[in-house]
Image (cartoon, rainbow, N blue to C red):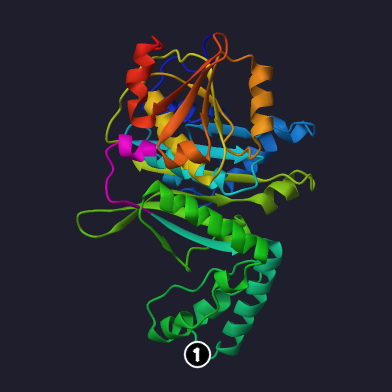
Amino acid sequence: MIIEIPKKRLDKIDEIAIHHGFKFTEFPVSPTNINSFLHPEEKSVVIKNHDQINDIKSIEPAMIYYDRPIFINKKQAPNQKTHRSIGFDIIGIPNGIAEAIILNTSIKILAEEGYKNIFIDINSTGDKNSVLKFNDELVGYYKKHSNILENQCSKNLTKKNFKLPDCGHECCRSVKSKAPRPLNFLSEESRNHFKEVLEYIEELEVPYRINDDLVVENNFYSKTIFEIKMEDSKGREIVLARGGRYDELANKIACKRNLVATGISMYFKKNKNERAYSDEIESPKILLIQFGFRAKMQSFRVIEILRQQKITIYQNLHKEKLSEQFDYAKELKIPYIIVIGFKEADEDEIIFKNINESYNDVVKINKLPQYLRKIRMV
């Protein structure tokens, strides 16, 4: 069977997205007067238009991607001939693996486009209670020092906009350097979530830095906020993608149905325009089952190897229980299973299970392409 995609021509971005578990989706495009460059407001359109909002019984997360901006400002209309605009969203996964999947997929795309010197800026403003505490402390701090700030900076401080002032005046820079930071007001849950995300990023082996100044106006993102940047030959930092977790926004739009969501918007200059290996990508015949933190990270390696071999897989990296994953395999009636547990993750191995012929093989991850040729899957 072939994965149904409403596009006649697939490129490398489609290929990478599909192999990492994302499904192509189209959203209505709306005109706007706001600065539309990677604006988080588009995530509200994702939630409002996604089918899962109307399906309260849905328990499986949704992983979607789209290849055009949701908002278009005519004065800032993106040049589709020279640039790419991509969005990724995962709806329904509360833990840090959602951020890891999105960042890993985005970085794979940028690497495929030839981008180098990539790094991640990341921060956390925490959940709703964390934001309220930080807001109160920050506004109080600046009110206390308002007589020192420049007039415009002082006017910018409101309850709805806790973005730190950014100007060239020495007095403002001095006050800003001693201002409260969001990370100091995180609830225990938000702190643990941020720690988990950082652990995943460290395993991705992409440079990152915690940027206290990375915040978003109107509290669009809750918990994690991140940007993917590159440093050019002149040492300038160029933003290629911006995203974060927007649980509070999703809950508000979904009328408090306990919905969680994470997303990213990418906008970058085309360096390449390569086609996918095929305009027709086959449905998966393999289910990847994993158990443990290291196993999830090894799963990224396996997914990439299989992509290079033109093999798609079913994956549930958000699931923690082995029983749930094996039950899912029975439900799918899938012929092959790849298992990565604690032992396999530590020894860079997988267990390849042939369900129909009832045999298991232990295979080194770096030998997986040869093994697939041996059993004539490629």
Q: Position of residue 181 (x, y in %)?
A: 54, 74
Answer with left or right where residue 177 lies relative to residue 160.
Answer: left
**As drawn, 337 above or below 101:** above
- Specify whether residue 341 is in view: yes
Viewer-proximal residue among 147 and 191: 191
**As drawn, 11 above or below 121:** above
Q: Position of residue 279 (x, y in %)?
A: 41, 14
Viewer-proximal residue among 12 and 344: 344
Q: Magenta includes 187? A: no
Answer with left or right where residue 333 lies relative to residue 269.
Answer: right
- Specify whether residue 72 is in view: no
Q: List the single residue furthest toward the left.
A: 233
Q: Position of residue 235 (x, y in %)?
A: 24, 60
Answer with left or right where residue 23 lies relative to residue 251.
Answer: left
**As drawn, 146 above or below 237:** below
Q: Position of residue 104 (x, y in %)?
A: 44, 41
Query: Looking at the image, which residue is at 69% across and 53% down?
Result: 248
**As drawn, 195 above or below 102:** below
Q: Quadrant of the C terminus?
A: top left
Q: Quadrant of the N terminus?
A: top right
Kindly indicate the quadrant of the structure image that contains residue 82. top left
Q: State the residue position of label 1.
A: 148
Query: Label 1: how many residues lie within 10 Å, few (<14), some (14-19) or many (20+)?
Result: some
Answer with left or right where residue 227 lies relative to residue 157.
Answer: left
Magenta region: which residues? 108-119
In the rendered picture of this protein, how many numbered marks are placed on residues? 1
Q: Amino acid at mark 1?
A: Ile
Query: Looking at the image, which residue is at 44% across and 38% down?
Result: 298
Kindly indicate the quadrant of the structure image that contains residue 221. bottom right
